[in-house]
Image (cartoon, helix red, strand yellow):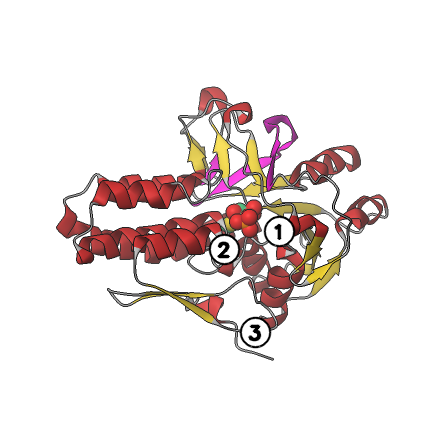
């Protein structure tokens, strides 16, 4: 079995000049690295999904800002270029704006700190979340909110990793996540590499699995959580939340505080990325659909009322009146 570079954070490497990104488009078949030497290269890599997942694109953009400092680029132009790469994940703008507010000489160290801090944050999310799961946890997750999507360890998969370490995880059910197959290509690979029991299912099999009592918790990540608790995450998350409600299964959202967006009142105001029709008409070189119109929203919004708990590094977050307050798990 191939070593999974994401578990040690090797999937995002910055040497002060170049950013090396493990190309997530090719996984798990090939481990190939893309080298970025300008902020524009980093923005292209984010837009083209070389690197994806809300915290991971925030970290990559932070290194793009660090690069801009060492190259003597206009920092405002670099910031706009990076922020325009993908619209939904708030971590991207959060990381760039945080660095832009600093004196330029402080940006490189602050960019590195965003990366290292993310791993600590994910471990804390994992430990808080694991306490919410039953002793025989059978967790359904969607997309990839794992080490690859973050600086390491993962958010939703951080909860899974902590539960596994505590001996409380029976199995992870990984939805394949059409159309880009992050569940099939990335989550299944990460878990298999770490020896965590994982069963892959088609997205359309989730309802029958829940009806059969096979799932006792759903745990997902998020690209943005609005001030009222609405959650933007990978397309298909909303269907799982509706199903979980119907079958009385807790639905947890595992997020770093950098994904909480106090400036966006509700999910209705979250920009949803629309992606290319080719992603739905086929995959890679293979094409299976005729040249018909395609709708390909990359994310959907799950209303707060369907969420059992939002798990952050500081404990459970409360939306609305309790916004910005945390309670112990
Ligand atoms: O389009 P992607 O692959 O970037 O979408 C990723 C997700 O939807 C993840 O669930 C989310 O970013 C959380 S990652 C910890």
Residue located beneath label 1 in the image: 143
Spatial separation of the CA atoms under disc 2 and disc 3 = 17 Å
Question: How many numbered discs?
Answer: 3
Residue located beneath label 2 in the image: 149
Spatial separation of the CA atoms under disc 3 and disc 1 = 19 Å
Is residue 112 rendered magenta in the image? no
x and y, in percent, of residue 319 in the image: 49, 26
Is residue 314 rendered magenta in the image? yes
Left or right of 275? Residue 98 is: left
Left or right of 164? Residue 215 is: right
x and y, in percent, of residue 14 in the image: 31, 65
Contact (Cβ within 8 Å) of mark 1 with mark 2: yes
Residue located beneath label 3 in the image: 30
Ligand 1 within 8 Å of the CB at mark 2: yes
Q: Residue at the spot x=68%, y=66% of the render?
A: 197
Whichever of labels 3 and 1 marks the residue nearer the N terminus, that label is 3
Give whichever of 3, 289 is nearer the camera: 289
């Amino acid at each position: 079995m191939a070593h999974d570079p994401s578990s040690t954070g090797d999937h995002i490497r910055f040497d002060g000049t170049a950013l090396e990104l493990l190309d997530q488009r090719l996984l798990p078949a090939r481990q190939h690295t893309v080298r970025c030497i300008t902020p524009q290269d980093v923005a292209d890599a984010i837009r083209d999904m070389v690197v994806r997942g809300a915290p991971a694109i925030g970290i990559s953009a932070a290194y793009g800002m660090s690069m801009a400092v060492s190259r003597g680029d206009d920092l405002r132009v670099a910031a706009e270029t990076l922020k325009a790469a993908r619209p939904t994940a708030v971590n991207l703008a959060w990381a760039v704006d945080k660095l832009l507010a600093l004196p330029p000489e402080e940006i490189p160290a602050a960019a590195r700190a965003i990366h290292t801090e993310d791993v600590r944050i994910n471990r804390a999310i994992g430990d808080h979340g694991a306490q919410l799961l039953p002793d025989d946890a059978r967790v359904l997750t969607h997309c990839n909110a794992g080490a690859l999507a973050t600086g390491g360890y993962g958010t939703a998969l951080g909860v899974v990793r902590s539960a596994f370490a505590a001996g409380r995880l029976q199995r992870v059910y990984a939805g394949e996540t059409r159309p880009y197959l992050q569940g099939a290509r990335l989550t299944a690979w990460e878990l298999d590499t770490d020896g965590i029991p994982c069963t892959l299912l088609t997205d359309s099999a989730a309802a029958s699995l829940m009806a059969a009592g096979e799932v006792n918790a759903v745990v997902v990540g998020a690209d943005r959580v609005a001030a009222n608790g609405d959650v933007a995450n990978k397309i298909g998350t909303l269907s799982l939340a509706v199903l979980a409600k119907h079958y009385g299964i807790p639905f947890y959202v595992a997020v770093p505080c950098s994904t909480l967006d106090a400036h966006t009142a509700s999910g209705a105001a979250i920009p949803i990325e629309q992606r290319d029709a080719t992603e739905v008409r086929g995959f890679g070189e293979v094409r299976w659909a005729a040249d018909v119109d395609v709708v390909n929203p990359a994310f959907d919004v799950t209303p707060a009322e369907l969420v059992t708990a939002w798990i952050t590094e500081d404990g459970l977050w409360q939306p609305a009146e309790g916004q910005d307050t945390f309670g112990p798990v």
